[in-house]
Amino acid sequence: MLSLRIQPDDGVSLGFEVKVPGAALALTPGIEVTPVKMDFAYANAFGAEVHPAYETLLLDCMIGDATLFTRTDEVEAAWQVIDPLLGLWESDPSTPLASYAAGSWGPEEAEAYVGKRGVAWRKP
């Protein structure tokens, strides 16, 4: 599982299953595996004083560095996709836009959608 962490503990972690070292014995059926996790945290790698994302963006804005900002053509392309969807939701209220509380794992409709397929979202 790949996890991208954003504020306040910025970083990336990758979890997967690995074979336990050693030869498999004839008496032991199958292969023994165990979960492992690779973890990167900005605070650990670069010291405890990692600047919040908006602080970095505001500084970049003041010095004229647009590297971390979205280009105009990207914004326009995104609205070309989103505008028709917003228009559809406004014109046809029988298809409501799913919403959910901040800090939750998402809308109940998402749980139901994957549940119909016999799977579930994986939560840490």
Image (cartoon, rainbow, N blue to C red):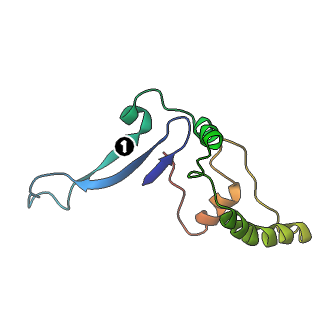
Q: Residue at x 64, y 43 (%)?
A: 61
On the image, which quarter does residue 45 sit in?
A: top left
Q: Find residue 113 and report its horizontal and vertical position in percent.
A: 64, 65
Question: 68 and 120: which one is in front?
Answer: 68
Question: 112 and 83: which one is in front?
Answer: 83
Q: Quadrant of the N terminus?
A: bottom left
Residue located farthest toward the top when viewing the structure as drawn:
48
Does dot 1 land on a helix, a strand or a loop?
Answer: strand
- Residue type at mark 1: give it: Asp
Q: Which residue is mark 1?
A: 39
Question: 39 and 46: which one is in front?
Answer: 46
Number of numbered discs on residues: 1
Q: Find residue 41 and report its horizontal and vertical position in percent.
A: 41, 38
Question: 17 and 83: which one is in front?
Answer: 83
Residues packed near mark 1 inside 10 Å, few (<14), some (14 to 19) or many (20 plus): few
Q: Residue at x 60, y 51 (%)?
A: 66
Residue located farthest toward the front when viewing the structure as drawn:
63
Q: Find residue 82 and report its horizontal and vertical position in percent.
A: 75, 67
In this rendering, would 97 be left or right of 26?
right
Q: Residue at x 80, y 73 (%)?
A: 84
Q: Find residue 105 and report its horizontal and vertical position in percent.
A: 62, 48
Q: Residue at x 63, y 38 (%)?
A: 54
In this rendering, would 106 be left or right of 6?
right
In this rendering, would 93 be left or right of 111?
right
